[in-house]
Image (cartoon, rainbow, N blue to C red):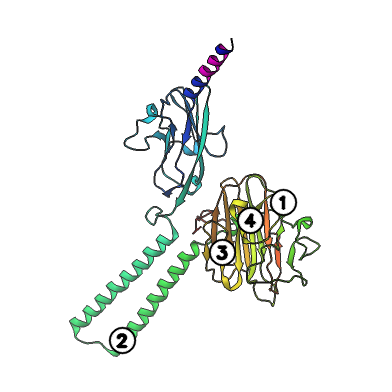
Amino acid sequence: MSSIIIITLLVNLLIEASESFTVVVPADPVVAHVGSSVILSCWISPPENAEALEIRWYRHDFNNPVLLYNHGKIQDVQECFRNRTSLTLRSDQSGGLKDGDVSLRLEKLTFQDEGPFHCYASGDTVYDSKVVDLKITVSFFSDPSGPWKALFFSVLICALLGLVGLILYKYRHKLTGKKPADEICEEEVLEKLAKEDCEETMAKLAKEGDINIDELRKHAVEISIDSERLHPDLILTKDYKIVRDGPGYNHTGDEFPYELCAFGAQRFTSGRHYWEVDLTRDNTPTKHYWLIGVVKQGNCRVKNRSAVTASAGFWFLCSDGPNGFHTNTDPPVKLSLTPRPERLGVLLDYDDGQLSFYNVTERKHLLTISSRFSGSVVPLFNPGVGDESPLKILDCPEPVESAADYSQPLLSNSSD
């Protein structure tokens, strides 16, 4: 009797093993340009016919698929991906669905497509899922409406017009053989006017690339500092908005004092949230030392730089005086920010996995860090040491409604 039970169990195990599979995707992020097409590779191992399986590609919501294949045909496509997605071959050697290839083709890429794509395959008794990370970059020729392309062509046109005018002007002199003094003066005036016109055109186009701060402030939230999780060597005002290093703190060594952390009292698990931080005060120099970002809820013990990594749930931009600006990404990004930010804007886009920083005074995008947030995250502040100015969290003014909206995207990629 026992031998029959053992044989039955072995048979069941063999049946289960024969029906099991795993979903396989590339280990590295897939990189593509705005406006181009991309293939997000995904296949079943060991290979088996996937025509009878449910194949579901989705982003953040399992029940709102980018593409759903079931019962031998595509059943549903998310509205914003309609006419842009299809199941495809990951290579010329692929046998398609019959060979377990369930790759997704995505066309006409936009910045909003950046982020995780889940590849899910399900049979009667087994299922598996993996994530493909899509990175979107800007190609000079993939964004015909980009402000820098318009700036480039405007400069080129100015240069060509100036060259043509100069050739015609010199050719006229060869015909006459003379160049009166008054014409020499006129030439200088025309060159000056042409130069001023080109400079005005370039300045105007460069301004069109500015960030619309009012659009960012539509996502503004009130931020305050959690006094119960404040480092003992920090001083906090009664309104929980201004923080600085205390006079009793003895900073040794040249490394930034990462342990002087203050944490926001607000927690975020989804959506877009924006806040601003003042880094200067009247009649005092702009702060040279600060750290601003977000941190996963519960990570409050900080001793040194090795403890504040992205893998540990920290994401931030740091100003370390003469050592410049850097992120804590892997690898870290070093920046040269001129002028030094006097007011810093922070936009947390939890769902799309982006943390962006802006120079509010200059209306410039500084940096976007891409990651995957999970659980609750809270704002992170560190005022550093040695500055006269404190770190002050601002209450954002109401956004100004304007008839002339900016065409610049809310989020743009920089070096990250």
Q: Position of residue 148 (x, y in %)?
A: 43, 61
Q: Which residue is mark 1?
A: 266
The residues tagged by marks 2 and 3 sit, at their Cα atoms, a distance apart of 53 Å
Q: Nearer the viewer, mark 1 or mark 2?
A: 1
* Amino acid on which disc 2 is placed: Ile
The residues tagged by marks 1 and 4 sit, at their Cα atoms, a distance apart of 17 Å
Residue found at x 58% / y 70%: 340
The furthest residue to the bottom: 181
Quadrant in which the N terminus is drawn: top right
Callout 4–callout 3 Cβ contact below 8 Å: no
Q: Which residue is mark 4?
A: 217
The residues tagged by marks 4 and 3 sit, at their Cα atoms, a distance apart of 25 Å
- Looking at the image, which is closer to me, 22 or 360? 22
Callout 2–callout 4 Cβ contact below 8 Å: no
Q: Quadrant of the rendered structure where residue 270 is?
A: top right
The residues tagged by marks 1 and 3 sit, at their Cα atoms, a distance apart of 25 Å
Q: Is residue 397 visible?
A: no
Q: Residues within 10 Å of mark 1 (few under 14, many from 20)?
A: some
* Amino acid on which disc 3 is placed: His
Q: Residues within 10 Å of mark 2 (few under 14, many from 20)?
A: few
Q: Residues within 10 Å of mark 4 (few under 14, many from 20)?
A: many
Q: Which residue is mark 2?
A: 184
Residue found at x 77% / y 60%: 240
Q: Which residue is mark 3?
A: 326
Under circle 3, the secondary element is strand
Q: As drawn, is 212 to the left or to the right of 188?
A: right
Q: For residue 10: magenta?
A: yes
Q: For residue 3: magenta?
A: no
The furthest residue to the right: 238
Q: Main secondary structure of the magenta part?
A: helix
Q: Magenta stretch?
A: 4-12
